[in-house]
Each structure stands twice: as C-alpha cells, then as structure tokens.
Image (cartoon, rainbow, N blue to C red):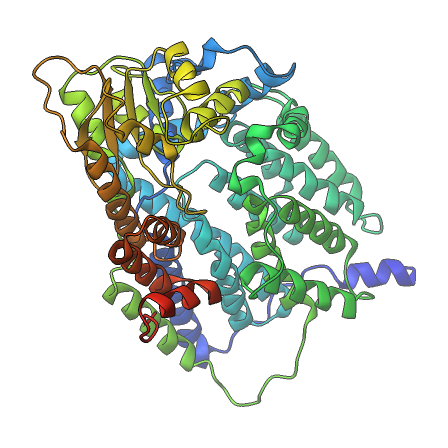
Amino acid sequence: MSGARAAHSTNRVQPPEPVSSASNWILYTSLALAAICLFGLFSSEIADTDFWWHLRTGQFMVERHSLPVPDPFSYTTALRKPAYPAEEQIRHFNLTHEWLSQVLMYFLYLTGGFPAIDLFRSGMLAAVCGLSGFLAWRLSGNAYVGIAAAFATAWLAVEFRADRPTLVTFLFVPLFVTILEVRRALWVLVPLSLLWANCHGGFFMGWVVLLAYCAGAVFEKDRLQLWLFALCSIATSGLNPNGFGVVSTLLGYRRSQMQSNLIEWHPPYLWGPPYAFDILLYASAVVLILNWRKVRLAHWFLYAAFAGASLLAFRNILLIAFLAPVLIAAYFRPRLPTFDFAWAVPLVLLIAIAVGMGRGAFFQLHVAGWNIPAGAAGYLASNHVTAPMFNTYEEGGYLIWKLWPQERVFTDGRALSEAVNSDYREILYNKDSAVDQMTGPRAELLDQYGVQVVAMNTLEYVSGAVYPLALALGRPENADWQLVFDDAQALVFLRRPPAGTLVYPDKLQRVLQHLDTECAAYIEHSPGTPMCARTLADYWLRNGLKDRGREMLRLYLAHAPERDQEAERVWRQIDGGLLPQR
C-alpha cells in the first residue's frame, strides 16, 4: 500500500475505546442527562409565525388528497403576472417541495396536538446534536469530548427552534455524514434520499455530502460501492413533485428581490462581538489548517461546502454548528489534565436541567400567544368578515390557519409573488408619497385589490421600524377607515363598516398607544429584539412627548444586546440619572 493510501486508510473512523466497568455508570448517567438536557433545551414554546401555514397546508392535502396548487390561501397570488420567466416554476416549488413534512406535521397535530409537534421538533434538534456528539466520540475516542461537541452544536442550534420542514434537512445532513463516516448500511441512503426529497427542498445538500465522500474515497477500496450508492441516491431523489428543478430554483432565489428582503437569506454577520457561529467557523478552520497533513479529503470538502453555504445565507449556519465540533474533536488533541473529572459531568448536567425547569424554559409544550393575532382573527371570524383583506407578512400564517376558507390573506411567509410583494411594501410604507397619508400609490393599490379590511401589527421587530400604514389609517381625516379592534398583537380596520359596528372614536390616539403596548409586549417575551423601543423613543422625543420617549428609551437600554452610546447620551440629556440596569 502506498504512503498516501495508508494515510487515508488509518484516518478512517475507528470505534471508540471501551469504557471501564467502574466508570460505566457515570458515562451512562451523563449520556442520559445530556439527552434530557438537550431535549428540554429545544422544547421551547411554538413561536414561529410560518408554522401556521405549514399546518394548514398539511390539513389541506390530507383532506383534499391533492397538492396545494394553485395557491388556495392568498387571493392576490393569481392577480399579478409573473415578474420574470422562472417565477411560475419557483412558485410551484415553494408550494410543493415540503408536502410530506407538512402532512406529517398535521398528523402529529391530530395525534397529540401542539405538545406532539413541540416534542417532535425537540427530538429532531436533539438528534442533530446527538449525531455531532456521536461522531466526535468516535473520532476522538473520548465519550466526554462527544458530550462537549453535542452541546457546542446546541450552542447555535437553539437559534433554530422553529417548527418548519427545514429541520428535516438539518437532521438528514448529519445522518448522511454519520452513515458515510461509519461505512455501514450504505443502502439506507437510497430510501432516505427519497424521503428527504419529498420533505424539504434542501435535499440537494445530500448530494453535496455524497459527492464529498466520493471525492475523498479515491484511495479507499470500497470506492466503487460508495459511488454506486451515491448515484442511486441522487437518482432516487428526483422522485418528487419538482424533479431536479431544485438547482434552477435556488439560482432563481439568488436573483429574487423578494427573497433578498428575507433576513434568513442574508449572510451572517462576521464582525462585532463574537458569537457561536463565527467562533465555531474560525476555530474549526484553524484546527484544519494546523493539522492539514492529517485532514481527510472528505472533511476538507465538507468544511468548504458547509462554510460556503453558511456564509451565503444565515439560514444555513446550523451546518457549521454540526460539523465544526466534529472536526475539532477529530484533529485537535490537546494534553488534558490527568485527574478524573468525569464525576463532575452528571452534576453539571443535573444543575442545568434544574435551572431550565425552574425558569420554565424546558418542556414548554404550548403555543406562544404573545406573537399571534389571535384576538384579531377571532374578531374577523365571529363577525363573519369575508371582504378582501390586507394583512402584514408576519401575521399571514396564523390568519390562514384560523380564517381559511372564510377569508383569504393578502400575503404570508410563503412569499409567492414578486409583484404582490412589491405592492405590499408600497401599501405598508407608501415610499413615493407622504408615509402617513392615504394618498398616492398606497390608496390606488388598496382600491386596485379591493381591500376592505386591514389586519396588522404595527412594528417590524428586528429592525424596529414602524409600519406607517397604521398611522395613516388612524388619521381622523381618513373617515372611510374605522378602527374596530385593538389588542397587544394587532389592529383591525374596516372600510365603511356596516351600521351598528362598534368603532373607536379616538382611533389615532388608540393607534399611538398601541405602538407602545405592542412593543412592550413583544420585548417582554423576546428581550433580545428591543429595537422597536429605540425607534419609538426617537419618535416620541421628536414630537415633544418626553415622558413617552423616556419610557421607551428606558425599555430599550434595559434590553439592548450591546452598548449604544448615542442612546445613552440621549438618556443622560433627558434624565440626568443612572442608566437603566440590564
């Protein structure tokens, strides 16, 4: 055997050394507690706004025995022509590529309600961490390194506690890597590819993993078998509603103005305070570079592919969260202390579980009522409102779940039409005329779509921007529009409401008060996104309302993720006292 071939052969994954019987109970207890801790960590409340249209889509397919094509939930999709030639293909892909996951989601709901969905999501994310830990254990020969790797993955995976079909891709990528690392039951890759291709469009990442290992197996004796199963797996994955159209669809995503507005498609930030992603990305790169002679070709290819995907879009960074701890465990071999610290692992895990349970953060198993327009949907349903509706993007999913088929939405998280998305933003922001007026393009578009109902939240929580449409509808001179519902999550306006409808006579004041109420309610449950308070503080202070501005500025400074010197300077000008405590 040549030197190169020998090097690659000895770098193949070997089973870990057996654990002595005297320490078995410590290891098994640690593994069990780690599983419980991970499961609890990922069982947060159901808070993702896209979850609701996934659930309704699954119900549609179960009850109607057909794919949701054409779009049954939004009345605007069919009203505008495609903005570019490939849009119809991309729309079909968006409507169909997750069909099996959505059906499974609905069956889980029928079987065990929202707790079943929560536990299933927790299990999938815990499995991602578990596979990272398993491979780190095998590659390092140390079970406790594996536990540490699992929690290193969890460090970033907590950002993905959303009930979406994309979790299938996040789980199947590690599953494919694990099967290819241990080189057992390669035939399983073929049915898994078929399942994956009908659960989520990210199945092409399976091709990436397969090709990485095939390219890295040039010196291995089982390379022909590996290539055979890889080709069969790729061919089988074409048995889905879109065939192999996923490639052209992804290229279309990169050219789409609508997709570019979605935060999940933006590149992750790499400057500023370090966080889990860039630490894992840089640390694994350093380890690979320092040990470049030992690194297997497959691992180089995987790192390049996963790092590239992660740097292109924030939605992909969990790929590095899985792979980086595995590579660090495989190639970083520091001299560890000689004393036995294994007994401390179950103790630390017990404390973590106790803290999570005590704070109510583990095993929540319920829906987050603070970010869904339940009150607004209830008002529209109980009053049998069926007129054309304008709604905000983030609330469209829940409105589909609660109101369809009585009412269809204007837009939602499926992002199906470039032209409708452009009109949506014009209505919401009115960029070409006074932002707080019912004039110009805004009024023309509302008339064009025949909108008679507006159900909306008033703030964009990540940037903190105020939606000017709410202020425009609230102005007294816009007498056609009346405010008929107001709670902490949403407002409902009706155009020329029927006689006898209860309306708020002081609608502008209600809208202005709602801004503060909605922002405070959101920050109470999501303190990591306080920018709405900063925006409102600036708005009130510019309009001479010092007390309201001070309260919003206090709320912002108490939750700001990092120091904001300009906001602190303004605080000292208007208050002169100590900064609010975080």
**513 above or below 553?**
above
**23 above or below 537?**
below
Instruction: Looking at this view, name the residue that lies furthest to the front.
Output: 544
Give the x, y percent position of residue 514: 24, 41
Question: Which residue sits at x=52%, y=27%?
Answer: 198
Instruction: Looking at this view, name the residue that lies furthest to the bottom.
Output: 339
Q: Quadrant of the C terminus?
A: bottom left
| Image-based side of 384 in relation to 254, left or right | left
Asked if residue 5 shows in the view, the reply is yes
Question: Which residue sits at x=44%, y=73%?
Answer: 27
Asked if residue 291 shows in the view, the reply is no
Give the x, y percent position of residue 488: 22, 42
Report the front residue among 495 and 97: 495
Give the x, y percent position of residue 369: 24, 43
Residue 497, quarter of picture: top left
| Image-based side of 8 in relation to 75, left or right | right
Q: Quadrant of the N terminus?
A: bottom right
Residue 358, quarter of picture: bottom left
Instruction: Looking at this view, name the residue that lies furthest to the left.
Output: 500
Question: Which residue sits at x=36%, y=48%?
Answer: 539
Residue 228, quarter of picture: top right
How many discs mark residues in the rendered view? 0
Give the x, y percent position of residue 40: 33, 58
Report the front residue among 567 and 13: 567
Report the front residue among 359 and 383: 383
